[in-house]
Image (tube, helix red, strand yellow):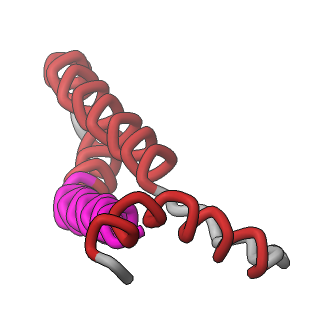
Amino acid sequence: MEARLIDAERLAAFARLAQAIAHEIRNPVMIAGGLLKRVKIQEDRTNAEKLSAVMEALDGIASVLKEVDSFVTLQAPRPKIEDMGLTMQECLNKMGPDMKKKGA
């Protein structure tokens, strides 16, 4: 049980880290994309192709960040009622041999 809790906490920490990194990357990407769109509208045809290439790269980064968001989004826990008697019996069954060895 403790190992599962540690694993769940570790996964949650990785998810928070991935979200924080995605957020820090997304902000400058969105700012740069917005500025490039404005510049592209005002630029002549010679620079339009270069600006389009940069905008495509920024769109690619943005799509990767969306994938990161969807991958690390944690689902809310779904509480359910468990039979504690059954749970306790399973624990006792697993611990029984060790308890007998120790004379408990």
The foreground one among 1 and 50 is 1
Residue 16: image location, x then y, percent: 29, 69
Quadrant in which residue 55 is drawn: top left
Q: Quadrant of the N terminus?
A: bottom left
Q: Which residues are magenta?
A: 1-29
Main secondary structure along the magenta-highlighted residues:
helix
Q: Is residue 20 left or right of 66 when viewed as pictured?
A: left
Residue 2: image location, x then y, percent: 33, 72
Residue 93: image location, x then y, percent: 57, 60
Q: Residue at x 22, y 20 (%)?
A: 53
How many marks are shown on the rendered structure?
A: 0
Let me know if residue 12 is in the magenta part.
Answer: yes
Quadrant in which residue 31 is drawn: bottom left
Q: Residue at x 84, y 78 (%)?
A: 81
Q: Residue at x 55, y 70 (%)?
A: 92
Q: Is residue 23 above or below residue 61?
A: below
Quadrant in which residue 99 is drawn: bottom left
Q: Is residue 11 left or right of 70 when viewed as pictured?
A: left
Q: Quadrant of the C terminus?
A: bottom left
Let me know if residue 16 is in the magenta part.
Answer: yes
Residue 47: image location, x then y, percent: 15, 24
Residue 9 visible in the shown view? yes
Q: Is residue 7 above or below residue 42?
A: below
